[in-house]
Image (tube, rainbow, N blue to C red):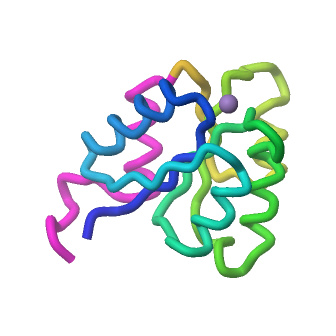
Amino acid sequence: MAPRVLVVEDNPVNLELVAALLESEGCGVIPAETADASLRLAAEERPDLIVMDIQLPGMSGHDATRRLKADPATAGIPVVALTAHAMRGEEARAHEAGFDAFLTKPVDTHAFRAALHRFLGDPRERPAVR
Ligand code: MN
């Protein structure tokens, strides 16, 4: 089975871009537009990876990731931060919240693929069916 990635992004254009990148890498995509939805979907679907926007309406990506990492059911799922804030200190704050990796927007496709390979393995070495 292809790896499934939960994408938490409130901007539809960014969501579409990230989903297209993931699909080109052979991943299935589970979309969520809010942090609340992401917590529910992470527990129900147990994705292989979560890509989380930090700036979300309502609960932030930081708080959602803290909750995911505090719940034994979801703590083992790697979470990659995606943020438009490339400010000094932002990466350290993301790591404190429990993110496993940190990427900035606009999405650098090379860095994005490298993160996917780090957490999911190289798709060329992945069996088509498992
Ligand atoms: Mn956002």
Which x, y percent locates residue 71? 75, 75
Image coords of residue 67 (percent x, y): 80, 64
**Figure quadrant of the N terminus:** bottom left
Residue 105 belongs to magenta span: no
Residue occupying the far left of the picture: 128
Q: Which secondary structure class fits the magenta region best?
A: helix
In the image, what residue occupies the spot 27% across and 63% down? 2
116 in magenta: yes
Q: Residue at x 61, y 73 (%)?
A: 43
Quadrant location of the C terminus? bottom left
Residue at 39% in and 58% down: 120
Q: Residue furthest bottom?
A: 72
Pick the residue in front: 48 or 55. Answer: 55
Q: Choose top left, top right, bottom left or bottom right for residue 68.
A: bottom right
Percent coordinates x, y for residue 112 in the rendering = 45, 35
68 left or right, relative to 96? left
Front residue (pair 31, 104): 31
Q: Which segment is the magenta one?
A: 107-130
At horizontal 50% and vertical 58% (from top left) the residue drawn is 49
Q: Is residue 4 above or below residue 85?
A: below
Against 76, is 89 above or below? Answer: above
Most foreground residue, 60 or 114: 60
- Name the quadrant containing residue 70: bottom right
